[in-house]
Image (tube, grey):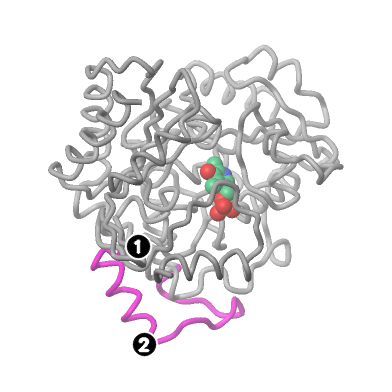
Amino acid sequence: MSEQARIVEATSKYLTPNYAGRLPVAMTRGKWSRIWDADGNEYIDFFAGFGGAGVTGHCHPAVVSAIRRQAGILLCHGNLYTNEPQVELARRITEKGFGGKVFFCHSGAEAVEAAMKLVRLAAGQGRYKTISFDHCFHGRTMGALSLTSEKYQAGFEPMLPGSVKAPFGDLEAVAAAIDDQTAGIFVEPIQGEGGVNVPAAEFMQGLRKLCDQHNILLVCDEVWTAPARTGRWFAHQHYGITPDAMTLAKALGGGAPIAAMVASPKYQDVLGPGKHASTMGGNPLCAAAGVATMQVIESEGLVERAAEKGEKLMSALRRARIGCVKEVRGKGMMIGIELDKPGKDIVSACLARGLLINCTQDTVLRLAPPLTTPDSLLNKGLWILINVLKTA
Ligand SMILES: *Cc1c(COP(=O)(O)O)cnc(C)c1O
């Protein structure tokens, strides 16, 4: 039995079988846009752990050395005290045009939970209802799951009361769904799990207006879309709007688990003393990884690179005129390829040829290469993908 087969077999023996579509591959090592499995096979990674390592690339030396340095100094002290790395990371996040104050946690779902509590406290007067959108994804904990689209909720009902859904892109439906118990609207500035759905600017601007009119909060769930992934620091900046709060997670730690809920200046002190907490939130180890990630994005110009290379990838895919491709869409390096058939076999065929991509909503292939990927590897990955698609 190969090393990899042994690990895969032990996985089914010892781990909860909750991950649908997990492939029989055990990863051991990653470097920039490449990753290796336990049998030594090498892959070009165009998905980088759901974008988790995907801004900086695997084991970016700056991130690794920040983790190494911090690991030798202090790992954790609890939030009765503060530390420099979390202050530095919060400063860097808020200085990118959003302002406000930051609450740190570890996962996207936790950041969304924090935003849900912020929304209820800020709206006050017993207002508790939320509006979120068809095909949205906000996480799997019970609160976040209540916002997430129905397909993920089966078997876990009842959801939180007042979790209202509206069609993505339909402002009139949103306006009709708001009543005097509504507290806030949760929206992904580009839907990720839902199929890389890019809303019209007018829709996002309309949501902002509705929230202002009704004095309710607009929360942008930027867990997939930020930092830098879409060619802006935060994807809401594409639409010329500012939400009242935003959530960050996947890529924030350059591969280390850290997440954040950022409240805008107007609401930055709403989660006051005693209102929320996380034992490990903002621990110096993960915060140091986050600081290094933000530094790399700046020093390597990754916001601009995402915008430029993303456009090139998308236009190359469109120019290839592949029969089974209905649409290529996205912003920056967050790219969706809608097929006229299920994409599962394409993902497997790419894997066999040494390219990792993803498929969501059955028919939408997703690409999210590390923003540091050199042109030569972007071209090589693209070439593999186009050839697989053409022979499919
Ligand atoms: C992945 C994701 C989440 C959940 O993040 P976890 O870290 O898996 O809890 C929430 N919102 C969006 C938009 C996501 O893409």
- Is there CB contact under 8 Å for labels 1 and 2? no
- Mark 1: which secondary structure? strand
Find the magenta span and give its range: 59-86
Looking at the rendering, which quadrant does residue 86 occupy? bottom left
Rendered position, 37 above or below 350: below
Of 43 and 353, which appears nearest the observer? 353
Residue 230 at x, y percent in the picture:
36, 36
**Residue 317 location, quadrant:** top left
Q: Position of residue 208 (x, y in %)?
A: 57, 26
Amino acid at dot 2: Gly
Confirm whether residue 265 shows in the render: no
Would residue 74 be counted in the magenta stretch? Answer: yes
Q: Nearer the viewer, residue 392 or 52?
A: 392
The x and y percentages for residue 279 are 63, 73
Density class for disc 2 (Cα within 10 Å; few <14, some 14-19, many ≥20) is: few
Q: Disc 1 residue type?
A: Asp
| Label 1 neighbour load within 10 Å: few <14, some 14-19, many 20+ | some
The N terminus appears in which quarter of the rendering? bottom left
Count of picture labels: 2
Q: Residue at x 22, y 24 (%)?
A: 316
Q: Along the horizontal axis of the image, is 120 left or right of 63? A: right
Expressed as whole percent of the image width and height from the top left, the position of residue 390 reads: 29, 23
Separation (CA) of disc 1 from disc 2? 29 Å
User: Of the numbered discs in the image, which one, if any, rests on residue 37?
Assistant: 1
Specify whether 141 is left or right of 35.
right
- Is residue 8 highlighted in magenta? no
Residue sitting farthest toward the top: 172
Disc 2 designates what residue? 72
Towards the viewer: 131 or 267: 131
Q: Earlier in the sequence, mark 1 or mark 2?
A: 1
**Quadrant housing residue 362:** top right
